Amino acid sequence: MNTFNAREQAFEMAFAHDEEVRFRILARRNALLAHWAADRLGYSGDSAARCIEQIANALGAPPSGQQSNEEGVLGKLVLDLTTSGWELNREDIVKVLQQCEARAREAVMIG
């Protein structure tokens, strides 16, 4: 294996690792947001599990370079939460999403 091939292989391994870390962070972030929303909506038991699954799956973790469905999900969360009596707007939900992502990043990076 020449130097070029070794460098290319190292780059590919680093890219694969970075994508795996990105996926794990987004998956954890989505689960945290879903749990937060289910709690605010007053769901428990099976209802909470279904709500969490729906939100986490809707957010998903898109392939690198592709747009996620975040805008649609955030809009639905705002509608559901305001209908349930919470005075939250899109910016409030985005702040929660960012907090969830920070917690998820920390958890994934720590191990």
Image (cartoon, helix red, strand yellow):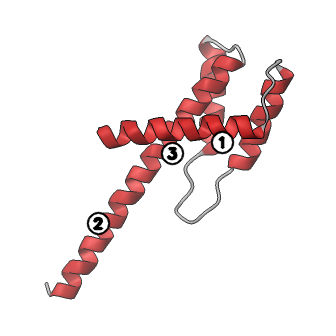
Q: Quadrant of the C terminus?
A: top left
Up/down of 29 relative to 69, above or below:
above
Tell me the element at label 3.
helix
Tell me the element at label 2.
helix
Q: Which residue is mark 2?
A: 13
Numbered label attached to residue 90 = none
Tell me the element at label 1.
helix
Badge 2 or badge 1: first in the primary sequence? 2
The image quadrant of residue 24 is: top left
Label 2 crowd (10 A; few <14 / some 14-19 / many >=20): few
Q: Position of residue 98 (x, y in %)?
A: 58, 41
Up/down of 55 relative to 49, above or below:
below
Q: Amino acid at mark 3?
A: Leu
Q: Quadrant of the N terminus?
A: bottom left
Q: Amino acid at mark 1?
A: Ala
Front residue of 100/43: it is 100
Q: Which residue is mark 3?
A: 26
Identity of the residue drawn at 61% across and 63% down: 66
Q: Quote the CA–CA distance across marks 2 and 3.
A: 20 Å
Identity of the residue drawn at 83% across and 18% down: 85
Q: Which residue is mark 1?
A: 58
Q: Amino acid at mark 2?
A: Met
Q: Position of residue 49 (x, y in %)?
A: 59, 21
